[in-house]
Amino acid sequence: MFTVLGPRDWTGGFFQSLGFRLVLPGSADPSLGEGYRKVSSEALAGLDADVVFLIASSRNTTAQARRDWQANPLAQRLNASRSGRVYVLDQQLFGRLRGPIGEELMIRELQRQWKP
């Protein structure tokens, strides 16, 4: 299962402010709060996003999240996976830091990873 962040989430709003269009599939999950969706790999594959920002959270490291994503055949069908546009980010930076200094660090990390 994946949790998809919407524009009402601080991190989702950050990505939207950068010009990304966020997609919230399915129906709201009251246990997650407004602006989030929990989706299966099958539902995620149906979105076929151009870019995926995969945020490793809890005990999952970015390296493990990348391996899990690469091992998921449904995730590999996405345009984002086929074109190398899956960015694995750390939740400590992209979920816990807030404010202008945090945003600057987030932008630097995106610039470091982004390949035109």
Image (cartoon, rainbow, N blue to C red):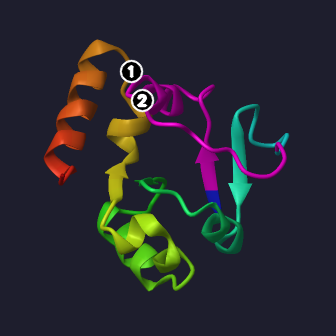
Q: Note whether 72 is above or below 109 in the view shown.
A: below
* Kind of residue at badge 1: Arg
Decide whether residue 5 is among the magenta residues.
yes
For marks 2 and 1, the one nearer the N-term is: 2
Q: Residues within 10 Å of mark 1 (few under 14, many from 20)?
A: some
Amino acid type for the residue under numbered disc 2: Gly
Dot label at residue 41: none
Q: Is residue 24 above or below residue 20?
A: below
**From the viewer's perspective, is 23 left or right of 80?**
right
Image spot of residue 39 (x, y percent): 70, 60
Q: Which residue is mark 2?
A: 19
- Name the one closer to the observer, 107 or 101: 107
Which residue carries the number 1 mark?
A: 98
What's the distance in space between the residues labelled 2 and 1, CA to CA? 19 Å
Q: Is residue 3 above or below residue 62?
A: above
Residue closer to the observer: 57 or 104: 104
In the rendered picture of this protein, how many numbered marks are placed on residues? 2
Instruction: Name the residue at 44% across, 74% down.
Output: 69
* Residue 80 in the image: above or below residue 70: above
SS of the residue at dot 1?
loop
The residue at 24%/42% (across/down) is: 110
**Of 6 and 83, the residue lying toward us:** 83
The local secondary structure at tag 2 comes to loop
Q: Residue furthest top?
A: 100
Indicate yes or no whether the magenta region holds residue 69.
Answer: no
Of labels 2 and 1, the one closer to you: 2
Span colored in magenta: 3-28
